[in-house]
Image (cartoon, rainbow, N blue to C red):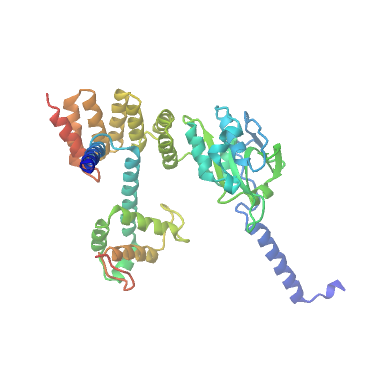
Amino acid sequence: MRSKFSSLVCLTVVLCLLTLNVASARAGLVSTEASMSATHNVENRAFVKAQLQRDDVQRILENKGLTVAEAEQRVDALSDAEINRIVEQVGDMPAGGGFFGVLIGAAVLVFIILLITDMTGATDVFPFVKKAN
Amino acid sequence: MPDQISGGGRKAAACLALLLLALATGCSLYGGVMPPSPSGDPLNRVHGVPFYAQEEYQCGPAALAMAMTWSGLPVLPDELTSQVYTPSRKGSIQPDMITAARRRGRMAYVIHGADSLSSEIAEGVPVVVLQNLGLSWYPVWHYAVVVGLDRETGEVILNSGPTRMKRTPWRVFENTWGPDFWGLLVLPPSRLPAVAEEKPWLEGAVGLERAGQPAAAREAYASAATRWPNSHDAWIGLGNTRYAGGDAEGSAEAFRRAAEARPDSGIAFNNLAFVLNELGRRDEALKAARKAVSLGGPQIETFRRTLSDIERAAP
C-alpha cells in the first residue's frame, strides 16, 4: 500500500519535472551563450571552406584524386563539432600558429581535413584510422 | 703572448661569445627591451591604486583587492581570501582570480604580452601579473600589480608583496613574468580596455551572467554594442539581459539591431518574436517568428515552438 503510494508520488514528481524541463528548454529566448557558439561554428566552417579555395590546397587535393567540389561536399557533411576539431588541430600546429592571416601549410591542412572526414566515415584515405559506423 | 692565439682559438672564443649572447637574450620575447609608450611619455603611472601589503601566501587576494578597489569597488584582501585562496595549494589559481572579480560584478579581462601591458598602463589601468620568482623547475608563483612603466630608467613599477611601488629592471621583470605573459585587468563593466577584442569581452560578459550579476553583464553588453555596433552577439546579449531586467521594449530594440547586424540570424528573429509577443505586438511577432523558422539553424525546434506559441495565443 505504502510502496504503491510512494511510487505514485515519485511518478508524479518525475512527470512534473519532465514537463517543466521540456517547457523551459523549448520555447522562448535563445541564450547569449548559444548564440555565441553558433557564431563560432559559422566562422569555423567558413574558415575551413575558405582554405579549400587556396591554390596550393587545391593542387594537393588533386594529387590525392579529389576535386574541390567533392572536398567541399565532404566538409559540408561534417558536424559543427567535427569542423571545430579541424580548426582546433590547425591552431595547435606549431608552424600554423595563428587562425586567420597566418598561412597554414597546405599539406598539413589537407591531411587534417581528410583525417577528420576519414574518422567520420566520409572518406577512407588513411588505413590507420578507425572508422565510425 | 696574446698575439699568438691561433685562428681556431679565436673562432672558438667568438662562437662561445655568440652562444652566451644567444642564451642571455634568447629566452626573453622582447630581448629585454621595454615596449615603447603609446602616448610617447617616458613615464606612465597608474593613479588611484591603493596598497595592501600581503600576508603570507596571500598575494592573490592582495593583488586582486588593489585592482578591484582601483576599479571603484573598495574591498580588502581578507574579504576576498575565501573566494580566491586555496589552502591546500597555499596559493590562488588564475581562474579563481577571474571568477572572484566576476562574482562582485567586475569585468575580468585577460591580456598577454608586453605590448598589451604597455597600452593598458598608458591608459591608466593597473595590471595584475603572475610571476615566477623561482626557477622553471622550482617555481615560486607570485601575484603583483603593475602600476607604472618608467622608460627612462628602464624599470617596471609594481605593488608587490610588502613593497609599495617597487622598482624592478624590465629585464628582470620580463624573465620572471609568466606563464604566457599573463595579465589580468579588473574593470567596471562599462569600461572597455584599450586592447579590447570582441570575443573575449563578450565571453567575460557571459561569465558575469553566470556569476549572477545580470546588471553588470547588461552594462558589459551595452558597452560592447557601442564599440562594435555590428556585433550580433553583443546585441543578443543586451537583448537577453534587458529582458531579464524587465525592460522588454529595450530588449526588442536590441534584438532588432542583432537582426540588422546579421539578417540571416534565426536567433535574432526568434528572440525578437518572443519579446514582441510579450509586448502584445502580435502581428509583428508572427512575422518575426516566421522569418526565424524560414532561416532555420540548429535552434530550429525552439523557433518552431515560439511560432506555434504565438499562433496558439490567437485572439
- Percent across and percent down for residue B149 are 65, 39
Q: Is residue B101 above or below residue B130?
A: above
Q: Is residue B20 left or right of residue B311?
A: right
Of B238 and B88, nearer the camera is B88
Work out whether residue B31 can be spotted: yes
* Quadrant occupied by the C terminus of chain B: top left
Q: In terms of depth relative to the viewer, which is nearer, A23 or B193?
A: A23
Find residue B91 and report its horizontal and vertical position in percent: 59, 45
Q: Position of residue B57 (x, y in %)?
A: 64, 43
Residue that lies at the very extreme toward the front in this rendered image? A1
Q: Is residue B193 depicted above or below A60 in this figure?
A: above
Q: Quadrant of residue B126?
A: top right
Whether residue B192 is visible: no
Q: Quadrant of the N terminus of chain B?
A: bottom right
Q: Is residue B104 left or right of residue B284?
A: right
User: Where residue B127 appears, x then y in whole percent?
Assistant: 58, 39
Residue under the image location 60 percent in, 53 percent down: B29
Determine the residue positioned at 66% across, 32% down: B51
Please give left or right for residue B234 compared with residue A26 in the image: right
Residue drawn 26% across the image and 62% down it:
A71
Q: How many marks overall?
A: 0
Q: Quadrant of residue B306?
A: top left
- In the foreground, B7 or B109: B109
Question: Where is B148 relative to B8, above or below?
Answer: above
Q: Nearer the viewer, residue A121 or B235?
A: A121
Q: Residue furthest right?
A: B1
